[in-house]
Amino acid sequence: MSVEAVIVERWVDRALKSYPSEMHSFLGGEKDPFRNPVGNTFRENLAALVHELLGTMDKEKIAGALDGLVRLRAVQNFTPGEALHFVFDLRPVIGEVSGAISDPLQSRIDELALMAFDQYMSCRERIFELRINELRMWARSAAAGEGGTP
Amino acid sequence: MNALYSVLVVLALVLAGLAGGRVEAGRAVLTLAVPYAALAIFLVGFFARVLRWAWVPVPFHIPTTCGQQKALAWIKPSKVDNPSSRWGVFARMAAEILLFRSLFRNNRARMAEKRLILGESKYLWLGALAFHWALLLIQLRHLRLFIEPVPAWIDGLERLDSFFQVGAPQIYLSDVIVLAALAYLLYRRFRDPAVRFISLFTDYFALFLLLGVAVSGVLMRYFVRVDILSVKQFALSLAAFHPIDPSTLNPLFLAHLLLVCTLAAYFPFSKLMHMGGVFLSPTRNLANDSRRRRHVNPWNYPVKKHTYAEWEEEFRDKLKAAGIPLEADDAGNARTN
Amino acid sequence: MPETLVQIEPKPPRGDWRNPKVEFRKGAMCYSAAAKNLTYLGLPNPRAWQPADSDWKLPPDWKKIILDGMKDRLAKYRSFRLFMDICVRCGACADKCHFYLGTADPKNMPVARAELIRSVYRRYFTLTGRLFGSLAGGRELTEDVIKEWFYYFYQCTQCRRCSVFCPYGIDTAEITLIGRELLNLIGCNINWVMEPVANCYRTGNHLGIQPHGFKDSIDFAADEASEITGLDIEVPINRKGAEILFVMPSADYFATPHYYTLLGYMMLFREIGLDYTVSAYASEGGNFGSFASHELMKRLNAKIYDEARRLGVKWILGGECGHMWRVLHQYMDTMNGPADFLEVPVSPITGTVFEHARSTKMVHICEFTADLIHHGKIKLDPRRNDHWTVTYHDSCNPARGMGLLEEPRYILNHVSRRFHEMPENTIREQTFCCGSGAGLGTDENLEVRLRGGFPRANAVKYVKQKHGVNLLTCICAIDKATLPTLLEYWVPGVEVGGIHELVGNALVMTGEKERTTDLRGEPLAREEVMAGGESEAAHA
Ligand code: SF4
Ligand code: SF4
């Protein structure tokens, strides 16, 4: 197994620890992307992130992969800190695998974290927007109904 | 914790069986009182439970449809997974009971890198199916102990079962399968944290009890070599309600017997009742024909409704203003507009 | 400096499932039912409270009420009694629930959801449970257990996916419904169920639109359909002597994108010259009662037969709606039948006798339309839908409570040239729920809905990336109301529409004016039509 693959695997492992331990074997084990959408989101996107971090740091690809993850984390029952903790899980993983983290890699991870924050905020904003849109729509229809129970 | 308790209970049973076999009084209890009591509890309990279910009405027609309905003549219906006739239901239930159809649905065998992958959930189906069939076979084989002369079909079964003849005594395939399947089911309960999360004492207890029965049986057949003749004599006498003196019986056999009796007596109070229940499940044993044939609810009762008349009364002005035809001012004459 | 200061610990295990503590969080819970709605319906314990309150103001004898309620139902529903007894906790249903998959909360396993009530059953209604208590899997009924029931029974959309995989067909949806019935007995219900029920009971539809408002909406839509087609389209209301009563979910005339489906129906009926009427009294097919109790289900559903009898129609045609059809297909005849005052449905256009609806006398619009197409009675130009690359989401109830799988697909294949299925284990009887059904589709519950809708969205995303899908079609009013929001979040760029919207687009009507836009007013893709046509031909 390549170093990259080892890093991905361990990172996924660590990141999934943020779910109740009863879930780990399913989230980590079930490979069908449709039966296990959460686990699959992690596997796919963390792999893409590692590839970019160790490679060329293609901004678009990173944003895409990060988006998949953050979008999911933003709706699950997490505090913001818990939701984004997966980014910081990478440090100990790389530490384990290659002993030390080079400075450029450090700053790349920092960059990743900052991007994740931005995306998290925009996801949360999006949720509230959508909520308001729905409310508005219902209010409009309700007004048209001018009814309801007395 | 649950698992531990259940192991302890089973071990205690084994010890009771072994110890009881050494004293006369114990033997008497184990070979007389216990088997008959267990049998009585099993029979009464089992039928009481099934009858109680059967007693409860099925108010609504709620099959879970797992395939295309029979509606338009030119669209092919899924006759088994969404049965519309009695035969379809029969086939569906047969597939469910004999082949564990629904568990099999879990099996999404996928081709990945030109290799067929069977995941964990496929083994659940395999394990469960293997276990139940092997258990059935073993039970049928045991009938030879209760019937004299032994019917030919039991001999046939045994020949089939020992098809892979290895050494003497012949090794029954069903014995191997039962042990392996039980071990797997137990392993799965321990290993999968999600399943462990929902597992109760009774889940482990049932498994350990069955394992105890199987292991003691296997020990007797292949290792301790219990005198099969005396066992058969005993079994026949038991079946004839004329029990003989059990002094020749091996303690291991008594342990086996006690475990079996415990299983039988415990059966009606446990989830093992799924054996009877599966036949009654209204999501499976009804044809999906609720629009074709009216299903009757025996306790259907009138409910409070907001009738048309009340509704018209309440909104009369608005109906009028909107030009929607009314009943009341038209003296019930049919109107068309 | 203490190193643990900023350490975020991995989530602890849920631990023992018997611990009933739950936490109600804003944005991830439904509000309680307003007292006025309960009062109007004559339901017990109307009061002001919220799930996040510590005191739920239960009636003093709540425990007795619940236990009596259980006893009553154990004697009335074989399903309930049996499902309480025979689960072996094999876990085959576990990873089948979209809420489990989306929330990663082990208590959202269908089996765990059922155990919440099963544990109480064992403690109070079985010998072993009474003797051995928790060792036999029993659990005391406490106020915390009630809160936990509320939390998890309002996190189940009664989609029945779990039931497909259970070796005994244990249907957690049934258990959830009965659990909600029990909660109703002590006044623990949610407003998004009870308000629509109360409204529907009073005015005939969920939003409480009064008859004149109903007429305005219908007329408005008819005008718009007329404008699009250049034909004179009218929709009769409460017309006696019509051959067919048409019943649709009320969202079809007050919400988008349902509205376009309504236009589609109208155009279709006009084109084939159907002798029909809609009713302002029975102006709701959807049945929110089915999310609360069997009794409320029956009280709302009764209007349909009553109205059919009053209007003297021959049979009833039903529009696109999921839970509406669960009730019509599996409950209506039993509850409010027999419909012996109606006739066995016969399509007046093709002469097809709908034998399968011989007793209930109610036909699904997709069955009706598929039959029309099969007999070549309508002219369709699928190129008019070329601006849509379509996928089809099986709505839970028509799929698992009916088996209506091929009819909509047959129609789609005739009105669209770009139809792509989602992966096999996410459609048909294995379809993933939208995550907002059974009364959970309210804005204050959006986060839970987003979690529950994730498995569905995940499959949509896949076909979007693979085939460029930009329209998800479905035949359910709740899907149409809630999936747009979900997809906007998870898979931006995929819209939601009904089957009969596409039928309306493709329908070539006699004497119509040339169409330049679709029902949404969006320009048709004329150029693409030709290019697409050629490449398609080359492909063949
Ligand atoms: S699949 Fe059925 S028997 Fe198995 S745990 Fe789920 S509900 Fe119980
Ligand atoms: S009915 Fe649907 S939502 Fe409810 S437990 Fe089963 S799979 Fe989950």
Image: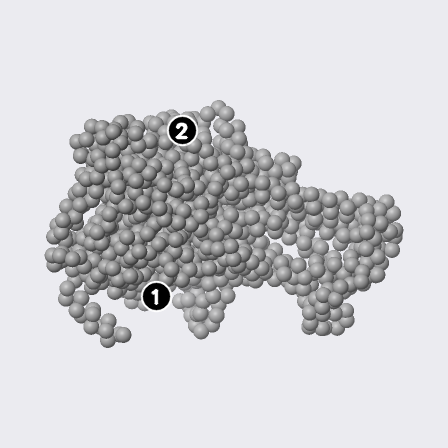
Dot 2: chain letter: C
In 3D space, how far apart are the residues under numbered discs 2 and 1 (Cα atoms)? 59 Å
Of helix, strand and loop, which one carries label 1?
helix
Q: In the image, residue B31 lies at what x, y percent?
A: 81, 49
Q: Is residue B153 visible?
A: yes
Identify whether B194 is placed above or below B332. below
The kind of residue on which mark 2 rests is Leu
Residue displayed at 15% across by 64% down: C526
Q: Is B325 left, or right, of B170 in this rendering?
A: left
Q: In the image, residue B129 lies at what x, y percent?
A: 59, 60
Disc 1 packing (10 Å; few <14; some 14–19; many ≥20): some
Residue displayed at 14% across by 49% down: C232
Residue annotated with mark 1: A51
Identify whether B296 is placed above or below A100. above
Q: Which quarter shows the C terminus of chain B?
A: top left
Residue annotated with mark 2: C43
B66 or C466, which lies in front? B66
The kind of residue on which mark 1 rests is His
Q: In the image, residue C498 lies at what x, y percent?
A: 27, 52
C366 or C160, which lies in front? C366
